[in-house]
Image (cartoon, grey):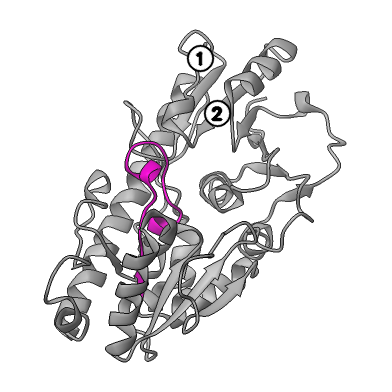
Amino acid sequence: MAGQPLRVLILEILWQHTEVIGTWLDYFCSRGAEVTVYYPEFEKTPHNYITIWAKLFKFTFNTDGLFNLYDYDLIILNTSSEEMVKRLHTNLPCIKMIAVGHYATRRIAAAVLQSQVAELPVNPFFDHPWAMPVCRRLADAVADSRKTASPHRNILIIGNSFLGVPAPIFNAITSRLRAANYSLTAALYSYNDISGYDFSNIEVRRNIAAIDLYKCIEDCRFILFFPADYHYMNQLSGTIPLSLTFGRPLITLANVLQPYAIEAHYTLDDPALIQQLEDGARYSAAQAHLQVRLNEYLADSAAALESCLSALSIGSQQPPAICG
């Protein structure tokens, strides 16, 4: 009805992509929509982001599925599959949906994307506009991190990113960093297999809550990032939006960040890497670049979502001011 707030239902049927939900909450809550998040796997792991988003946004949280899908103007499938889209569209042909695409190899067929269904990728490996899953309100809350270097000489490893590198190379790199007087912390998930890797001098924190991961990021000076093969052509690594949001430069391989148009200020194959890590001016330049790209991605992601809404004939409002 005219004049009524848009009613949005965000469905996360699986368990692993709650960090992306903040992007949709940021957009719709800032525009006065009434949002419900359905996440039945809330108790599965402490490492979900629902408690973070509950501190930043006002929305209804549901775990039991006792709601009427026809009460909503828009459904966002936060981790979608073609089978899920077909099933929902067959049973609910009049409901408009956005299918969030996490994997370029699991695209929704064009025949399924009719006038009631739009696909919104969250990586650059699709052939149409995509949304970097960054959240303006979270970025505002941690703005100071993007402008300062942590006083701690700490380098953080997040999740399974190290699994893209053979153990001997990983061990040699981490030994080199420790020899330069850097401590290392690894925030890992329960399913991360570290056998064969030398973690004897690395602090390992498993299955920590999202708020504790954020604290680890704020406390670190750099993030060590070895992408898996699929991060080159299929799927976004969550380390990249975290680097943008918190202003923590990545120590990585030279070509990893090219699909995201992010400059690599610290590359593992550079003989001068250790000297560069000590260069304050270089660090400030890296943080300034991450701030620029963050603002650009906030605008581009909102535009990509606007494009989906336009395709579904759902109106929208102007985005908020650029993040500071």
Q: Secondary structure at mark 1?
A: loop
Find residue 249 and report its image quarter. Answer: bottom left
Q: Secondary structure at mark 2?
A: strand
Question: Residue 7 placed where, x, y %?
Answer: 67, 35
Which is nearer the N-term, disc 2 or disc 1?
Answer: 2
Q: In whole angstroms, how far apart are the C-alphas of marks 2 and 1?
A: 9 Å
Quadrant (top left, top right, bottom left, bottom right) of the N terminus:
top right
Foreground residue, 35 or 153?
A: 153
Question: Residue 27 placed where, x, y %?
Answer: 51, 46
Foreground residue, 94 or 248?
A: 248
Question: Residue 180 placed where, x, y %?
Answer: 27, 89
Tell me: residue 51, above or below residue 121: below
Q: Which residue is mark 1?
A: 113
> From this viewpoint, is residue 23 visible?
yes
Question: Residue 32 placed where, x, y %?
Answer: 60, 46
Q: Is residue 290 magenta?
A: no
> From this viewpoint, is residue 309 visible?
no
Quadrant (top left, top right, bottom left, bottom right) of the C terminus:
bottom left
Q: Which residue is mark 2?
A: 99
Tell me: residue 288, above or below residue 283: above
**Looking at the image, which residue is at 40% across and 73% down?**
143
Mark 1: few, some, or many residues within 10 Å (few <14, many ≥20)?
some
Foreground residue, 68 or 149?
A: 149
Looking at the rendered structure, which numbered label has been put on residue 42? none
Is residue 271 found left or right of 90 in the rendered image? left
Find residue 181 and report its image quarter. Answer: bottom left
Residue type pointed to by label 1:
Leu
Q: CB of mark 2 within 8 Å of CB of mark 1? A: yes
Magenta stretch: give its range. Answer: 222-241
Residue type pointed to by label 2:
Ala
**Looking at the image, which residue is at 45% across and 49% down?**
133
